[in-house]
Amino acid sequence: MGYDVRWVRYDDTLHTAAFVKAASQEAEARGGLEVEFKRGAGVTRLFVKLPRSSLEVQPGESERAPDDGECWGEIHFSVIPSAQRGFEVLRHYPDERGYIALSRSGDDVLMLRDDGVVSRWDGVAVHDGPRVSEGYLDDLWSPEPGVAWVVGDETFHLGPSGWTRVETGAGVPLHRVSGRHARDVWAVGEGVVFHWDGTQWSRIPSPDFGVGYGLWVDAEGVWLTGSNVKLLRFEGSQMVPLEIPGGVGAEHSWYEAIFRSGGELWLAAEGECVRWNRGGATVLRTGVEGPSAFAGTSSDALVLVGTCTSASWDGGSWSPVASLTERYVAACVYSDGSILASNPDEGLTRLVPRGTHAVLSVSSGFSSNRNLWLSIAEFAAAIARRLNMTVQP
């Protein structure tokens, strides 16, 4: 079979493979794995005989394993491919520090707090950084580690010397910022669009689109949504209005979030979204009230978070994400393909894609042996590594 096992279900809870600190190494000559893990002050080595072709583990196989050479029992493991698509919640990270914007930065995620502090999430824990400003800030974007932009009442840039204030000449607060790389950055305010070329900010001619809600920048163009002009695209040297074909979505006053992938453009309105591709434009029911942001790895794997409800797209339909209920305001894709979403009142939530992974289920017959039972988590992590899974904390 050979599944890409990326997540481990242990003790009826879905975890990443490194939710405990364990290390393993192959022992091909012995036909198995040697799992090394810490327990208390000491180190225990548990040898488990596995099939030589471990990349093709058959569901339901079990092997006998010793516990410190004293007793034997069985560890059962199964590789179960996920039949569903879309996303499911991996873990909640309770935190009341109020993150209002997220941006992936290499293997980290930068997070803007509502009090002006920019924090960093390394996949395991949150590390608070400096307070960039005591004024109102609205969005941040990072093209690479050590470089970032924050916009709001004022604009700030993170570079080698830390955070510095930068004058844009906008004259109004900027609400959205995004870009392609460090020398190609775009920012949107009320009726204004600005571009950073690595040296200075320049205003881009545009019609009065009102409040800028959504901004999307990729290798093929720049798109934004506004309150007066629903959709605009950068063409030549200016922003120009775009009409959705067939009058699709005419009933929507504006679009609050935007996403583009594989030649498809997604626009989120209250309870619905427009999907526009070569085949035309269609309106789909999302059920998301107060849509805030899209995040996804492709047009077949999307999450739309909102201030009242959130939903996941599985390639065929939208369905509610039960654990994402109130006031999710930001989301971004992490380096392993999972999605991090922010609720300023409750903290962070990490979602993982269904259908692109298998679940490794591990259980043990050692109900009376607490020491070996505690080792099952490490054993699961070791098998997952052996199956070429992506190990993320």
Image: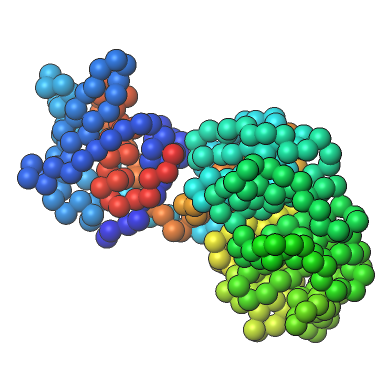
Residue 60 location, x and y as percent? 26, 46
Q: Is residue 292 above or below residue 265?
A: above
Residue 249 in which image quadrant = bottom right
Q: Is residue 333 above or below residue 207?
A: above
State the residue in front, 362 or 47. Answer: 47
Q: Is residue 230 above or below residue 95?
A: below
Q: Residue at x 74, y 62 (%)?
A: 200
Q: Residue at x 22, y 34 (%)?
A: 35
Quadrant including the C terminus: top left
Q: Residue at x 81, y 35 (%)?
A: 134
State the residue in front, 33 or 105. Answer: 105
Residue 62 location, x and y as percent? 20, 41
Does the image show residue 271?
Answer: no
Does the image show residue 148?
Answer: yes
Total marks in image = 0
Q: Is residue 391 left or right of residue 305?
A: left
Residue 384 location, x and y as percent? 31, 45
Q: Is residue 42 left or right of residue 9?
A: left
Q: Residue at x 63, y 34 (%)?
A: 129
Residue 164 in which image quadrant = top right
Q: Is residue 84 left or right of residue 178?
A: left
